[in-house]
Image (cartoon, grey):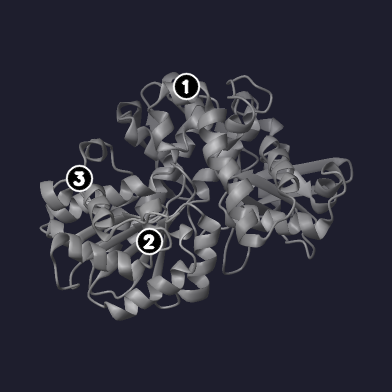
Amino acid sequence: MTLETLSNEQILERLRQENPWWSTGKIDEDYSQMQRRLYFDLFYPLVEDLSIKRAVILMGPRRVGKTVMIFHTIEELLKNGVSPHQIAYISVENPFYNKMALEQLFKNCMKATGQTSPKSWYVFFDEVQYLKDWEVHLKSLVDSYPHTKFVASGSAAAALKLKSNESGAGRFTDFMLPPLTFNEYIHLLKLHHLIIPSQVEWAGTSIHFFSSTNIAMLNEHFLKYINYGGYPEIIFSEKMQSNPSRFIKSDIIDKVLLRDLPSLYGIQDVQELNSLFTSIAYNSGQEFSLESLSRNSGGVEKNTIKRYIQYLEAAYLIKIIHRIDHNSKKFSRANYFKIYLTNPSLRSALFAPMQATDKLMGAMVETAIYAQWLQREWFQPWYARWTQGRFQGEVDMVELSPQNFKPVWALEIKWSNRAYENPGELKSLLSFCETNKLKSALVTTLDKEGSKEMRELKIHFLPSALYAYTIGRNTILQKQKRS
């Protein structure tokens, strides 16, 4: 029996279907009607500039909107006068293009549009990780077609980052699209009426913060953000929110844990990896040690646990935060550390959506606030924990100066108003700030805001939801200044 193969005309017809602007001049309405992520304004200039002879690698966790951002980029290129016949989108995972080299795919696009010159094209390869040795193919394209902009995207963030670093030096520019910040959640759902500007006096300087016209409603949305808000698609769908296990766990977590990481790192026992991640997700924000993780996982070797943690961090599922002591000194051996999910809604997918009064809600609020800070790749947070006699102290987040490693500020994260009403109970924070000569500190609350003085320390109180919004918003602004 002779096996049928796809004809060249069938491949060209498939490319025409994937690129409707070749005939209509527009992207599909489904994409054009979607709100753009705030990260779009950072991504688009990297693509548009043909003078920089580098491919752009758009990476990030699954379901954060990479493909949608590509189509929004195509829409903007069309709006800015780029010929629709010089823009190509190719979903590399499509079986029509099975094992086809990237250069051949590009040549087929030129053939399908009747173009003869490769100059001034914008070519988008989506889900590029499905092509073996994609990084070698892409590097060759950048060298062979210096007047063409190539963009490759993929959901296997760990794999893309590894391959990009190995082969793309001087040829690739990486762009990480993270899960939604709370600021982006507010933006996409058009809830700006809940936010009003305000200011906080911090160390003699006015700092831009935000207040709310309705903190109760904002807190309701903050809870939804914690449960579902990392993914643009899910915040608009009540059906998906009703069954996050089906729409998040199976499509996002399982594919990373059961397929991406095992194939990349040669992991044999995927059950060990899955069990470890499940334990970390349930206890996000808690302090761990390799010994405790090994013990709780049924005796998996500590070196194996350490490798698994590195893999999960490379896949942008978790983040390790290291510890300092009462005097802000780092420990010579990192025996203890905290682990946070990079996206709090991963937890609700594995277990169940949180309620505002749940026992572990405080830990997930802490995870959500860390998730905002983790989008600043230049920022390294720490936490402080120490024992002095009978007194055990802890501060949730500390920034250390990169110059002298002294604390710049300290933050305590709460999901209640108790500290606001009884600031004297903040013994750990007061002791840490006094020891390290800090004059100001910030404490989050459920819905109270204001400032109080305790033992020459000015404590600023701000609702957790507003603090999360502020950090996310300021992160985008700072990224724009740095770009």
Q: Which residue is mark 1?
A: 220
Q: Residues within 10 Å of mark 2 (few under 14, many from 20)?
A: many
User: Does 353 appear above or below 179?
Assistant: above
Which numbered disc covers residue 177? none
Residue 431 vs residue 124, the one in the foreground:
124
Image quarter hosting the N terminus: bottom left
Q: Which residue is mark 2?
A: 152
Q: Position of residue 297 (x, y in %)?
A: 82, 44
User: Does 341 appear above or below 128?
Assistant: above
Image quarter hosting the C terminus: bottom left
Q: Amino acid at mark 1?
A: Glu
Mark 2 element type: strand
Instruction: State the CA–CA distance, disc 2 to disc 3.
Output: 19 Å
Query: Residue at horizontal 15%, vertical 73%?
Result: 117
Q: Residues within 10 Å of mark 3 (few under 14, many from 20)?
A: some
Mark 3 element type: loop
Q: Residues within 10 Å of mark 1 (few under 14, many from 20)?
A: few
**Mark 2 vs mark 1: in front:** 2
Which of the two labelled residues, at mark 3 and mark 1, occupies the earlier sequence position?
A: 3
Q: Quadrant of residue 234?
A: top left
Query: Residue at horizontal 38%, vertical 55%?
Result: 478
Q: Which residue is mark 3?
A: 27
User: Does 345 appear above or below 129?
Assistant: above
Q: Amino acid at mark 3?
A: Ile
Q: Is residue 136 left or right of residue 84?
A: right
Q: Position of residue 355 (x, y in %)?
A: 59, 20
Q: Amino acid at mark 2?
A: Ala
